[in-house]
Image (cartoon, coloured by chain):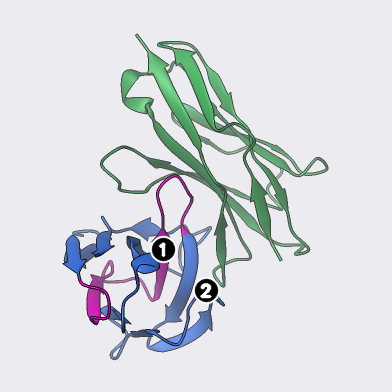
Chain colours: A green, B blue
Amino acid sequence: AQKITQTQPGMFVQEKEAVTLDCTYDTSDQSYGLFWYKQPSSGEMIFLIYQGSYDEQNATEGRYSLNFQKARKSANLVISASQLGDSAMYFCAITNYGQNFVFGPGTRLSVLP
Amino acid sequence: DTGVSQDPRHKITKRGQNVTFRCDPISEHNRLYWYRQTLGQGPEFLTYFQNEAQLEKSRLLSDRFSAERPKGSFSTLEIQRTEQGDSAMYLCASSSLLGEGYEQYFGPGTRLTVT
């Protein structure tokens, strides 16, 4: 069985600063994918970034980067230069490539002006 | 590409009634997923289809829940004899085997309220 743990129910960050959202995972699969999604108050789930378990380099997408530490089973999301529009719920998820997606409980990020 | 659409966006029903939701995935996506999300929680997997075949169902999916994807395009999720505990947001997502990580793209959801 797969499991995602997000230990930060809520986080605050000052506008223009960087913030790290924590995610640890548990899986018995050798091959897996890790994802981060953003859910604003409007409710839609927005795909942000993906990291494959065999990828040697950390994934980056614009202001988002994923700090992947396989031995520690962590996949933290780093948001650089925070913007007010980044205020939302953030979910970490794991898949064994398509057959199942397991989401964590989420972290609510609030960006302060 | 118009994205994943879901209908209706909101549904209020009385306990004991049946409800049906529809999901139209991104046209070239062959995988379709249903999730349930309650307030303050992450989405919980319910079931998934590859083309028209339903390949996995969560233990969360009781006998009152049924999903279909008859022609491998749109999908329906039916809840029979609704209970107050069924009140939640029902999310649909689709993905493509051609995507590097099979990342899922979500619809706006159907919010169900059972009174």
- Does dot 1 land on a helix, a strand or a loop? strand
Residue farthest toward the right in the current orientation of the protein: A71
Residue type pointed to by label 2: Leu
Task: Please report the residue visible at 35 percent of the width from the left and 71 percent of the height from the top.
Answer: B29
Cα distance, mark 2 to mark 1?
A: 10 Å
Task: Please report the residue visible at 24 percent of the width from the left and 74 percent of the height from the top.
Answer: B21
Q: Which residues are magenta?
A: B14-43
Of B71 and B10, nearer the camera is B10
On the image, the x and y values in percent for residue B58 come to: 54, 76
- Quadrant where the image shows the N terminus of chain B: bottom left
On the image, the x and y values in percent for residue A93 come to: 56, 51
In the image, residue B24 lies in the stretch drawn in magenta: yes
State which tag comes first along the sequence, 2 or 1: 1
Identify the mark at residue B60; answer none if there is no mark. Answer: 2
Residue type pointed to by label 1: Arg
Q: Is residue B93 visible?
A: no
Query: Are discs 2 and 1 both within one chain?
Result: yes
Characterize the local packing of mark 2: few (<14), some (14-19) or many (20 or more) Cα atoms within 10 angstroms: few
Q: Which residue is mark 1?
A: B36
